[in-house]
Image (cartoon, grey):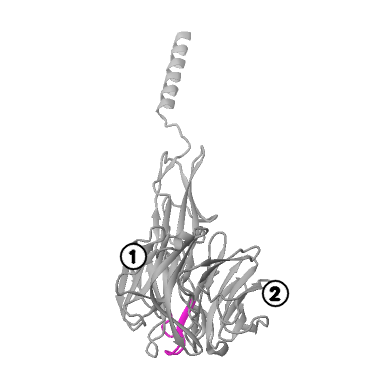
Amino acid sequence: MKQNKLALLLLSSTLIFSCAKDEPQLSTPQIKATGTSDTLLMGHSIALHPHVTYEQGLTYAWRVNNVTKSTDSAFNFNPSDRGDYRVVFFATNSVGTDSLVFNIKVNGKYENGFLVLQEGQYGVANGDFAYYSYDSSKVTMNIYKKENPTLQLGPTDATLQYATIFNGDLYMVVKVGGPLVVVDAYTFKEKARIPKLPADIGHAFLGISANKGLLSSADGLYQVQLNPLTLGTKIPAFSGAAGDMLLVGDKIYVMSETEGIVILSATDYSVLKKIPKATLGFAKTKDAIWAAGDSSLFRISPNSMDVARVPLSFGITNPWALWSWRSASITANPNGNEVYIAQRKEAPGIGGTLEYSGNKIFRYKDGDLSSLSTPFITLPPGQYFYGSAVRYNERKQQLLVYTLADEWGSSNDNKWQFYDAHAGTLLSTVQYTGYYFPALSIYY
């Protein structure tokens, strides 16, 4: 009898052990996926479906910027706004949890590229902007009108002349009877405008803080309140026409028609220093502020405001003739020591000098006078600078040069020429016809 009981016990133990061997052993789930970083254009979506091992008894969660959005094993990410997103996938069972992070940058409709301001045909059509997409290497014309079909940038005899991006908005200045207009830089939908500017001739805009800016004009320098957009009082310490402006630290650099460079305190707009004989500016390298005039480059220390002059082999134009102001033909590598300046021609105008044409760009390497001995870039035959001539594209390490096929600008043959900023070689050209008059590029 005892032997039978022992045999039965051994048989039961064997069966239990055999069943235990047959049952799968749970482990912490493991998530696998390729391509955990991506870039997306607003209006598009992306399907995320990572592979998970040990799928028995799993629960899932998707969190977007710390907010739970789904409990499915797959997720269709369809953002409602531009920005950087951290999408985290969790897989959990009774043993543990694994997670995987997807970093997704969502670009606005107009973001992964750059803008070119085009003056428009005087008396016929308003100026507007062309958008160059890095994704497609294609140009979309007239995007302001496309996004704001019922609005106008002033009368057709006004000229779109200046624009800059500040705190996610694009501020554009239309001179000779035009407005100051603000659009969302990424959708180009208009947000606000000041319809009438001082002396009917606005020049440039400079953002100072979240609610403060400055407008330069033929009638001097004016404060601008940003929220809501309102033209404020004139800066009493500044007289005469004002043009380009630059904010560096706690100092504002303003180009004056009559006084050269006027450096203001960004706190109270008091005058800190005046630098006479400068007629165009500004550009910033990592160590200095740059302007030009009187056949010289002006190197300004941002801390001490000390000035060193670098001789140029050509004269500097003074574009202050009536209705003829435009942003200066000077640019720089903000993280390097290279300054680029276009050699322009000049002619007498009403109340000042007209700036036009030119086909050579000189590069100055800070501290190396020999770098100015020969032109860095000479345009192809039959091409001449238009507008502000050249701007530095920091993202691509390129110079973008705008040209027409006529010295005085009477041409519908528009070209954007892309040059390597280090070698000076021509990389590519965008060409199109029409009386657009490309004058200034703006980078995101």
Report whether residue 362 is seen.
yes
The image shows residue 73 at horizontal and vertical percentages of: 42, 50
Q: At which x and y percent is residue 27?
A: 47, 35
Q: Position of residue 415 (x, y in %)?
A: 33, 73
Which residue lies at the image location 52% right of the left edge and 70% below the top edge?
Answer: 296
- Assign the magenta stretch its main secondary structure: loop
Image point 42% across, 41% down: which residue?
A: 55
- Over which residues does the magenta segment extend? 148-162
Q: Is residue 62 above or below residue 30?
A: below
- Residue 104 - label: none
Q: Identify which residue, 99 or 182, lies in the foreground.
A: 182
Residue behind mark 1: 137
Place of residue 385 in the rendered image (x, y in percent of width and height, measured from the top left): 38, 75
**Which element type, helix, strand or loop, lies under badge 2?**
loop
> Mark 1: which amino acid?
Ser
Nearest the eye: 236 or 294:
294
Up the image or down, 419 lies above or below 145; here it is above
Q: Which residue is mark 2?
A: 268
Marks 2 and 1: which is nearer the front? Answer: 2
Task: Please give the name of the residue rendered at 46% of the width and 88% of the height, measured from the top-left corner.
Answer: 349
Left or right of residue 322: residue 41: left
Please determine whether, in this image, residue 164 is positioned above or below residue 49.
below
Kind of element beneath mark 1: loop
Nearest the viewer among 418 and 148 is 418
What count of labels does the image hold?
2
